Amino acid sequence: MVLGNWNEKLLLFRLQTKRDPDAFAALYDLYSERIYRFVFFKVGGQADAEDIVSESFLKTWNYINSHRDEEVKSFSGLLYRIARNCIVDYYRQKNSTNQTSGELSDDLGDGGKWYEELRDQVDGRQIIQAIKKLKQEYQEVITLRYVDELRMEEIAEITGKGKIAVRVTLHRALKKLKEIVEL
């Protein structure tokens, strides 16, 4: 993970200082699958997810080019934030056309161990169905932590919360998920 972080920082430096399209392409290759999973899990449709991922990368490119004086400290944090906003825009647009939305929206205690045991006992589809029953905030932290395998610091940056608030939210989300699965 450390090597990947240095690689990201080097590519980001090249992108910010030289507007290097090859650096952006390398960052795209590094994050496209993760962002696709993040988006697909929230929108559920392949075509919509692909559109949102494309829009997210395009907006990220435009943001970096138009904010030349601002240092971007984490490409992944910026990209996830933009993807998250694109998903929100997607549902706003979908709701404005009167369609229904099927939005999907270091751990405390034994949350991580419990999740691993649950994953071994329950089919993946059952977990997804249970996660869909959670409120959006809980869905998001569980997805970012266990599907995208992000660190607490990254989740805090993406959600705009502190690390402790993310840990508490994740703990509550896992507790609620356990209640839903046990019903």
Image: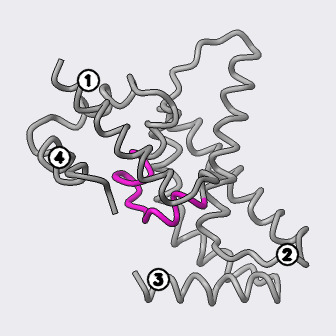
Q: CA distance from mark 1 to mark 2?
A: 44 Å
Residue 42 in percent (x, y) is at 50, 36
Disc nearer the start of the sequence (3/2): 3
User: As rendered, which of 128 and 31 lies closer to the eye?
Assistant: 128
Q: CA distance from mark 3 to mark 4?
A: 29 Å
Amino acid marked by disc 1: Ile
* Residue at the (68%, 77%) spot, across then down: 73
Q: CA distance from mark 3 to mark 2?
A: 23 Å
Q: Label 4, on which residue?
A: 114
Amino acid marked by disc 4: Trp
Q: Is residue 126 left or right of residue 18?
A: left
- The answer to the question of whether label 3 and label 2 lie on touching residues, with beta carbons closer than 8 A, is no
Q: Please give the range of residues in magenta.
A: 142-157
Q: Label 2, on which residue?
A: 70
The numbered mark at residue 4 is: 3
Q: Secondary structure at mark 2?
A: loop
Q: CA distance from mark 1 to mark 3?
A: 36 Å
User: As rendered, which of 48 and 38 lies closer to the eye?
Assistant: 38
- Verify whether residue 153 appears in magenta: yes
Q: CA distance from mark 4 to mark 2?
A: 41 Å
* Residue at the (28%, 35%) spot, across then down: 175
Residue 2 in percent (x, y) is at 43, 86
Residue 116 in percent (x, y) is at 17, 50
Compared with 114, 35 (above or below) is below
